[in-house]
Image (cartoon, rainbow, N blue to C red):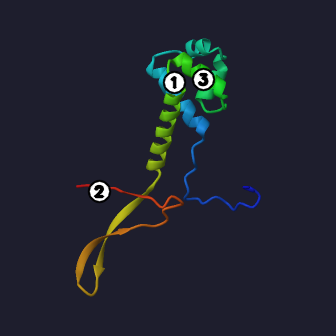
Amino acid sequence: MFDPAKAGPPDRREQPRPLLRTVLGDVLRRTRREQRRTLADVARAARVSMPYLSEVERGRKEASSEVLAAICAALGIELAELVTEVGSDLLLQRARSSAVVRLDVVRDSASRSSEPRAVTSNLGASNTATCLLAA
């Protein structure tokens, strides 16, 4: 079990992970706005208060599965669609924060040639890197 008292200070280079409720709220708000619907309209259809729906959309409240189902029904989407969209957003956020591989020219003293070489450092726990190339 995780003991916060024994955890050391967070690594300053490590990006904070997004909260699920924040990403979920972003997707709900984006869906509502794409439908050009008001907060009041969706709240009324979902039978939740407008301030509560606003808090959910801003990631300040964690909605129960029943409330999420009601909001999805009010928006005319399936809960599976919502979860899929949230998963996609989380993957995009992770990809944006991944390490970037820098290509440096390294001289080999034995052969006197200059070859591009990938230089990586501190890839984090995922051990994945993204290589950005430009022509």
Relative to 131, residue 119 above or below: below
Viewer-nearest residue: 106 or 74: 74
Q: In which quarter of the view is residue 129 placed?
A: bottom left
Q: Is residue 76 left or right of residue 5?
A: left
Q: Tag 3, which secondary structure?
A: helix
The answer to whether the residue labelled 3 contacts the one labelled 2, judged by CB atoms less than 8 Å apart, is no
Q: Tag 2, which secondary structure?
A: loop
Q: Is residue 117 left or right of residue 27?
A: left
Q: Which dot marks residue 97?
A: none
Q: Position of residue 74 (x, y in %)?
A: 55, 16
Residue at point 56%, 12% (across, down): 41
The answer to whether residue 54 is visible is no
Circle nearer the N terminus (3, 2): 3
Name the kind of residue labelled 1 in the image: Glu
Relative to 119, residue 55 above or below: above
Q: Residues within 10 Å of mark 1 (few under 14, many from 20)?
A: few
Circle nearer the N terminus (2, 1): 1
Name the kind of residue labelled 3 in the image: Ala
> Residue tagged by mark 2?
133
> Residue tagged by mark 1?
78
**What distance separates the C-alpha of mark 3 from that of mark 2?**
43 Å
Residue at point 50%, 15% (across, down): 37
Q: Which dot marks residue 69?
A: 3
Q: Tag 1, which secondary structure?
A: loop
Q: Is residue 110 left or right of residue 3?
A: left
Q: Position of residue 39 (x, y in %)?
A: 56, 17
Q: Which quarter shows the N terminus?
A: bottom right
Residue at point 58%, 27% (across, down): 57
Q: Is residue 130 left or right of residue 80?
A: left
Circle nearer the N terminus (3, 1): 3
Q: Position of residue 112 (x, y in %)?
A: 23, 83
Name the kind of residue labelled 2 in the image: Leu
